[in-house]
Amino acid sequence: MEEIFSHTVAYKPKEEFKDLITKMIYIAQALGHNEKNWVTGKELELLVELTRQHYAGLPLDSRESIAEVIKHTSFTNKDKNVYVYRSKLIDKGWLQKSKGGFDLVPFLKTLKLNNDQTNITISINTL
């Protein structure tokens, strides 16, 4: 049987977006049973930024995506670890390879940005 967690969260789309995504990730981790797939600090930072890029319509495998990661995170221009951490996110199931490059897990793509609240629904089988 599939277990589902659902909770409505109020937020200001532009001001609290990264906080909301971080909370969603923490909730998904808490519901999961496999702690080896939990994200570390740098992985979390990258995953939150990639989620922001998804909602901005930016392809996650583009050069522009890497430039945005460097601009909005603690990764530096000389830091090739973006690729390492992106691979770790794939290995842990937070990113999926697709024909066009990379894609987020489905529950991270469920926000309705025009609303002032969102219903977060996460299945334990999501990750």
Image (cartoon, helix red, strand yellow):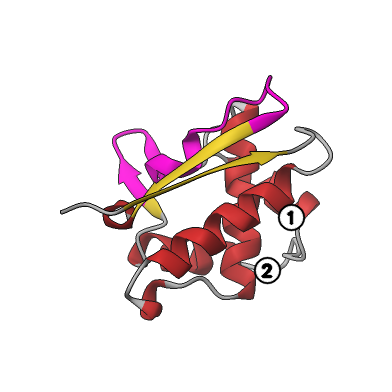
* Alpha carbon distance from label 2 to label 1: 9 Å
Of residues 75 and 7, which is closer to you in this image? 7
Q: Amino acid at mark 1?
A: Ile
Q: Residues within 10 Å of mark 2 (few under 14, many from 20)?
A: few
| Horizontal arrangement in the rendering, residue 108 relative to residue 116 (left or right) | left
Residue 79 shows which numbered tag?
Answer: 2
Q: Residue at x 65, y 50 (%)?
A: 49
Q: Residue at x 68, y 68 (%)?
A: 79
Residue 62 in view (yes/no): yes
Point out the image quarter for the C terminus: bottom left
Q: Amino acid at mark 2?
A: Asp
x and y percentages locating residue 46 in the rendered image? 61, 59
| Residue that extends furthest to the bottom in the rendered view of this protein | 36
Point out the image quarter for the N terminus: bottom left
Q: Are marks 2 and 1 in contact (CB under 8 Å)?
A: yes
Residue 1 shows which numbered tag?
Answer: none
| Horizontal arrangement in the rendering, residue 112 relative to residue 127 (left or right) | right
| Residue that extends furthest to the left in the rendered view of this protein | 1
Q: Residue at x 32, y 47 (%)?
A: 97
x and y percentages locating residue 53 in the rendered image? 62, 38
Residue 70 shows which numbered tag?
Answer: 1
Answer with the quarter of the image where residue 40 lies. Answer: bottom right
The segment highlighted magenta reads: 96-117
- The answer to whether 33 is drawn above or below residue 5 in the figure is below
Question: Which of pointers 2 and 1 lies earlier in the amino acid sequence?
Answer: 1
x and y percentages locating residue 122 in the rendered image? 41, 48
- The answer to whether 20 is drawn above or below residue 64 in the figure is below
- The answer to whether 103 is drawn above or below residue 115 in the figure is below
Q: Secondary structure at mark 1?
A: helix
